[in-house]
Amino acid sequence: MSGLNPAQAAAVEHTDGPMLVLAGAGSGKTRVITHRIARLVDRGVRPSSILAVSFTNKAAAEMRERMIPLVGHEDAHRLWLSTFHSFGVRFLQEETRALGYEGRFVIFDQGDCVGLLRELMREEGIPTDRSFDMMAIVSRISLWKNAFQMPGNVREIDYEYDNIARAIYPLYLERLESMHAVDFDDLVVRPVQIMREREDLRKKWRARFRHVMIDEFQDTNIAQLALVKQIVDEHQNICVVGDDDQSIYGWRGADVGNILDFEKTFRGAKVVKLEMNYRSRAPILEVANAVIAQSKTKRHEKQLRPARGSGPKVRVVNTPDTTAEIKFVAREIHDLRKGGDASPGGVPRKYKDIAILYRSNTQAKLFEEELRVAGIPYRMFGGTQLFDRKEVKDIIAYLRVVNDPEDELSLRRILNTPARGFGSKALKTVRAYGLRHGLSFYQSLRRLQTLDVPVRTARNGMDLLSALQTARDALETGAPLEEVTQRLLEETGFTSMIFEDQTKVGERRRENIEFLMRTFRRFDSERKISLAQLLARISLREETGEEDDSRDEITLSSLHSSKGLEFNIVFLIGCVEGKLPHQRTVDPKLTDAAPTGVDEERRLFYVGVTRARDLLYLTRASGKKSRGRTAPLFPSRFLEGLPDESVEMYTASAEKEMSPDEVANFADMILAKLRK
Ligand code: ATP
Ligand code: MG
């Protein structure tokens, strides 16, 4: 086995029975999984009987890439490499009948669920003003589902959000069912329930997999563990890898107990520890070790030694305010790229070597603007991405209805986009008719002409339905999706609505749509999956709209989404109290369903630090300007107690050379003042 140390090799060679690899960041846990799969295939295990679960779509895709050189293209594509959610989709697509949904179901993404919950709350007369935290409801219901708690047996806590969530939960389940919908949690929970209830299906799925491997096991929840237990029950060939120090999803119900109690759950498990870090230069690792050592939570002691030796110190940078912080990072990136003073050894760096990591997505918004102005290309993980943009969601909704006219939520979404006269009154009429005659929303719409709605509205509605039918027929005869979509959007007036908007926003929308069309073009040229599968992948955000990893762009990512990844140079920004740790976790007035406290934030910080290979910046601002005043910001507590010999501190001044744009703006400002 090349490229493995003895401990890793032992883990790779141990192929029968349960095994836990518990080790710190960058120690090669994920590498153990890929090599172990290769070893199994090598020993003649059928690739299609191997299931490996990654935490994110990106990680799963990357795993497949890494498998290709090890086992060849064909076998790499036979392996089951997925996330828990995409595994669930495949399971439910195959077992839709067991779901009780007569052969079809729709997947609601988080936006859909929030919309549905809001609707239910309105129906119940529960006010939801701007300050109402919908996510507080979403997350509570999600936690209950994942713990298999049905509406009758959820724990009673007497807080506003808990009370509302408890009242809405049963209605939410009913409505999902009536719409033939599953939410993300169902993708794991329902397969477990199905396997528990149906012996035949249990047998079938157990027989299918001989080996199961799970990455980032510290962030699995009760339902995910239950799913795994169902599948491996007979042979117990389960290998999990993880790091309790990187458990960062407690707020979402992940249970670090899954990894800490692994040996109890799976008797006779072999436990492997890895102690070399192959990712980070020594100073980065020393900082990481110092950060995590201050955790108050009980943890597995781990010694991580650097395999790569010394390197530049970690740069802890203070700037006067958040604007200066952003500008500092942009300037530094330019300098790194030129191989200027910032770059160790004067080596020019590529954009794609660089990542900017942050605690919350609002921080990214500010950066996006600056990067555009500075002409720095970037890609973004885990934020408002292409498929969350309104115009893109609208188009996807059109296609969802083409794919399945009974998809009520999508149908309602597009019915009045663009406006066709379907205000709340017309909708009520349609719905009331449906209730009276036991018809679905779609079936009622088809009888529009007999309903009490304005003639124009009825005609508009019928036109829409017929355009959708035309698109459906065209796809069935094999017409390309891109072309069909374009025509559909033109015929339904969607395109002219988008083109009417001549503002910058309109322009951005058209760009987003163009990106989406590229996804369709790729779909058309590959023709590997069905429209239903494409739509499922989009719901799960498995489609990124862009598959091209070769482009030279920096990465913007939330800390949560950066898990498992590595970058040569990392800027971990916003190292201030209130951001990191986040206000939410230190504020007593919690809206979080599962308050996790400061230690989870510390682990999140640790995850960020350990993404860096060569160079790490920890930046912070001493103030934040708002409405002409500067409010003070205080350094994050996680910057305390870092080893002196591994860090260098400096202050980046606000002054700097102005760019030509800024000089022009400045001149304009002076002129305007003079004119007054
Ligand atoms: P994380 O906890 O962040 O997920 P990990 O433990 O999964 O990290 P990997 O991503 O598998 O770590 O490995 C970290 C880096 O070290 C990768 O670039 C990997 O290729 C490299 N690496 C791992 N093991 C070895 C080895 N034995 N020899 C050389 N490089 C290695
Ligand atoms: Mg990993």
Image (cartoon, grey):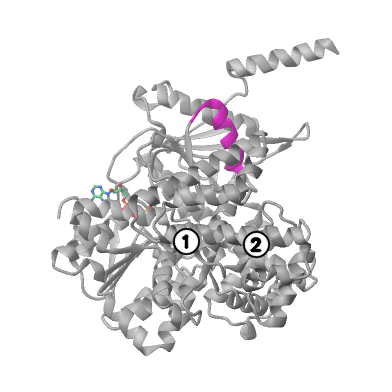
Q: Nearer the viewer, residue 217 or 100?
A: 100
Q: In the visual, does 44 lie left or right of 570? A: left
Q: Nearer the viewer, residue 337 or 242?
A: 337
In the rendered structure, does residue 337 fall within the stretch colored magenta? no
From the top left corner, tell me how far across and down residue 77 is, in percent: 26, 59
Crowd band around label 1 with a 10 angstrom C-alpha radius: few (<14), some (14–19), many (20+) = some
Q: Nearer the viewer, residue 168 or 360?
A: 168
Residue indicated by mark 1:
473
In the image, what residue occupies the spot 64% across and 30% down? 320
Q: Nearer the viewer, residue 283 or 613?
A: 613
Q: In the visual, does 446 lie left or right of 427? A: left
In the image, what residue occupies the spot 19% across and 66% down? 40
What amino acid is at disc 2?
Met
Q: In the visual, does 395 lie left or right of 473? A: right
Numbered disc 1: secondary structure: helix
Distance from the alpha carbon under mark 1 to that under mark 2: 16 Å
Please, is residue 649 above or below residue 69 in the view? Answer: above
Q: Which mark is residue 134?
A: none
Bounds of the magenta span? 363-376
Residue 48 in sight here: yes
What amino acid is at disc 1?
Asp
From the top left corner, tell me how far across and down residue 128 is, in percent: 77, 63
In the image, what residue occupies the spot 30% across and 55% down? 64
Q: Earlier in the sequence, mark 1 or mark 2?
A: 2
Residue 422 in sight here: no
Res 337 quadrant in image? top left
Can you say which quadrant of the picture contains the N terminus? bottom left
Q: Which mark is residue 462?
A: 2
